[in-house]
Every structure is written in C-alpha cells, then in structure tokens.
C-alpha cells in the first residue's frame, strides 16, 4: 500500500501513514481553510487500509493546535479508524496543555477506540 | 491629518496591540496570526494563556473569512467584505475583538445563539460542543458551527456582543472575547 506523506505547513499538519513500517501519525497544527478537502485523502487512505489492516495499529495524534473545523474532521478520522481491528490511539499533548488533554478525552468518549495519553 | 494622531491615541488608551481593518482571507488570517504570535512570544506570555489567545484568534478570524466571502457573493461590493479585527492587552486580560457586517435577517438568530451560549456553564458548553461535533455535517463554508462554542470555552467568560445599524440591509456585528491572564 502506498505511503501517504504530507509535509506540514503553518496551517496544515504533518501526516505520515505508512502501513509497511507501521507508522500512523498526524502532528503539528491543523487550521486549513477547507478542512474537509484537506482530510479527504487521509480518510480515503484509512478506509483502504481498513480492508487489509496490520494485526495492530497504533495511530498517533501529536497535535499542537487544531481549529474547530478540523475537530469535526478529526472525529471523522477516528470514526474511520473504528472499523479497524486492533487499533489504538496514542494521544500526545504538551505536559502543560490541559486543553489538548481534554480534547483527547472528549474524542475518546465519542468513539469506541482505546486511547492512551502521553505527554511530550 | 489630525485623525492619525487621534487613531494612535485611541489605540494607546484602549491598549490595542494589533488592529487590522480590511479584506479578510485565509492568507491575511495567517499573517495576522504570525504577527500576534510573535508579539505573544516576545512578551514572554504564559504558554497556557498564549494557546488560548491563539485559539480564540483563529476561530474569530475564520468566522470573518467565512462570512465575508458569503456576503461578497451576495452584495458584490467591497464595502460589504470589509471587517475589523483587534487585540488589546492590559495587566489582567487579552481581548480579541471583531466587527463585521451581517444581514439584518440574521441578527435575531445570532443573538439567540450567543445568549444561549452565555447561559451555559463550563459543563453545559462541553456537552454542547460534543453534541454539535457528533451530529453536524460540515457546512459548505467549511464551518462546523463550533466556533462560538469553542471561543466561549477557551475564554471562560461571557461573550460580549452588540449590533449597530449600517444601512437598511446590514448591521455591524461586534464581538469581544476576553481571555484572563491571571492563573485560575
């Protein structure tokens, strides 16, 4: 399966989805003008991956900041992940960033996926 | 030329650290954010406060971008796209303020929306946020209807707002979001 590799910018996150090496990560800042358009290839990639997923998938969110339009799409990404067996979300937050920790907790309450919280 | 000095004095007395008036796009949003961010960084602001201010700025700016593009299409005039964004800072707080024209037909709905938000406590806002994010499709404008809820949550204070009549069709909508600099 092809690697999805998007380099981050000042308003879009870095995205690396690599089935072969087992790396699944969204990191940085997410405040694109059109969040639906930006996340479309990500969700499509996950949907394809779900049809032949690795036995275990650790999906990392290492976000510094995201806007509300992105939060809706992050939920869509999580909903796509829900279809995958053996998936786990690692939610990273800065150790003094309570808002990002809380955001992760809220997402974890909205989907049926185990979340692990880590500081960085 | 007196107005130059007058404007400068107003900025000083209102403790405004950034004012932008004009056309709003994603590009201007990015420029304003990076300017404001430099300002916050150089003043050595507490990182939690900094993040909250940044957060409110993004939502406020993207609200204007969204609505001004909408109105540009409707009215087709430059005047209707023009809006204002500013930030003030004193010892106690930052204020993120915006002003933009909205059609009079939308005033009642927006007022109800904001009053509803202001009647909720922290838990109430959280429930509202989760409810909207779960049940709403993203609109064509790219908004999820979450911007004001998020601003209210990050602020922790009531959203202040007012409307001034511009002409027969439009009101000028002013919004002020306070972010305390004092630790909870």
Image (tube, coloured by chain):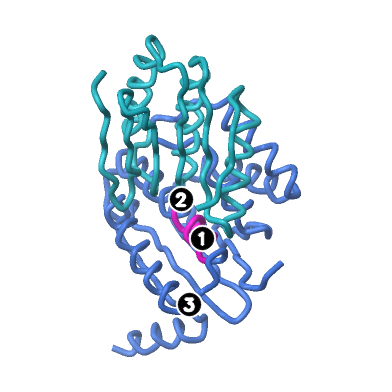
Chain colours: A cyan, B blue
How dense is the environment of label 1, judged by Cα within 10 Å: few (below 14), some, or many (20 and up)? some
Instruction: Give the residue displayed 47% in from the left and 54% down from the top.
Output: B60
Q: Are marks 3 and 2 on the same chain?
A: no
Task: Pinpoint residue B30: horizontal percent, then vertical percent.
Answer: 32, 57
Where does label 1 land, which residue?
Answer: B51
* A117 to the left or right of A29: right
- The CA distance from mark 2 to mark 1 is 8 Å
Q: Give the residues drawn in magenta, as a range.
A: B50-58
Q: Is residue B55 magenta?
A: yes
Where does label 2 land, which residue?
Answer: A65
Task: Pinpoint residue A65: horizontal percent, then vertical percent.
Answer: 46, 50
- The CA distance from mark 3 to mark 1 is 13 Å
Identify the disc placed on residue B44.
3
How dense is the environment of label 3, judged by Cα within 10 Å: few (below 14), some, or many (20 and up)? few
Q: Secondary structure at mark 3?
A: loop
Question: As rendered, which of A66 and B117 lies closer to the eye?
Answer: A66
- Magenta stretch: dominant secondary structure: helix
How dense is the environment of label 2, judged by Cα within 10 Å: few (below 14), some, or many (20 and up)? many
Q: Which callout, 3 or 1, points at the residue further toward the start of the chain? A: 3
Verify CB contact (< 8 Å) between mark 3 and mark 2. Answer: no
What chain is tagged by disc 3?
B
Question: As rendered, which of B180 and B18 lies closer to the eye?
Answer: B180
Q: Secondary structure at mark 1?
A: helix
Task: Pinpoint residue B142: horizontal percent, then vertical percent.
Answer: 40, 35
What chain is tagged by disc 2?
A
């Amino acid at each position: 399966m092809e690697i999805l590799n998007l380099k981050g910018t000042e308003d879009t996150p870095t995205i690396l989805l690599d089935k072969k090496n087992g790396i699944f990560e969204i990191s940085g800042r997410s405040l694109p003008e059109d969040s639906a358009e930006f996340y479309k290839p990500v969700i499509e990639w996950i949907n394809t991956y779900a049809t032949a997923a690795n036995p275990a998938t650790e999906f990392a969110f290492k976000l510094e900041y995201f806007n509300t339009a992105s939060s809706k799409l992050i939920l869509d990404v999580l909903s796509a992940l829900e279809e995958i067996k053996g998936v786990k979300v690692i939610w990273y937050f800065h150790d003094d960033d309570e808002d990002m920790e809380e955001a992760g907790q809220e997402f974890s309450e909205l989907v049926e996926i185990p979340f692990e919280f880590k500081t960085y | 030329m007196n107005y130059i000095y007058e404007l400068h004095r107003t900025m000083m007395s209102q403790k405004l650290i950034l004012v932008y008036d004009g056309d709003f796009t994603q590009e201007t949003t990015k420029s304003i954010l990076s300017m404001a961010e430099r300002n916050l960084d150089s003043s050595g602001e507490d990182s939690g406060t900094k993040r909250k201010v940044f957060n409110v700025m993004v939502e406020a700016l993207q609200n204007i971008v969204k609505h001004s593009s909408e109105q540009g299409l409707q009215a087709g005039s430059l005047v209707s796209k023009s809006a204002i964004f500013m930030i003030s800072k004193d010892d106690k707080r930052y204020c993120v303020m915006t002003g933009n024209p909205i059609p009079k037909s939308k005033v009642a709905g927006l007022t109800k929306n904001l009053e509803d938000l202001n009647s909720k406590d922290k838990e109430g806002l959280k429930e509202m946020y989760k409810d909207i994010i779960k049940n709403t499709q993203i609109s064509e404008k790219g908004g999820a209807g979450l911007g004001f809820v998020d601003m209210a949550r990050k602020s922790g204070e009531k959203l202040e707002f007012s409307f001034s009549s511009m002409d027969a069709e439009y009101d000028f909508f002013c919004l002020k979001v306070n972010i305390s600099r004092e630790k909870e």
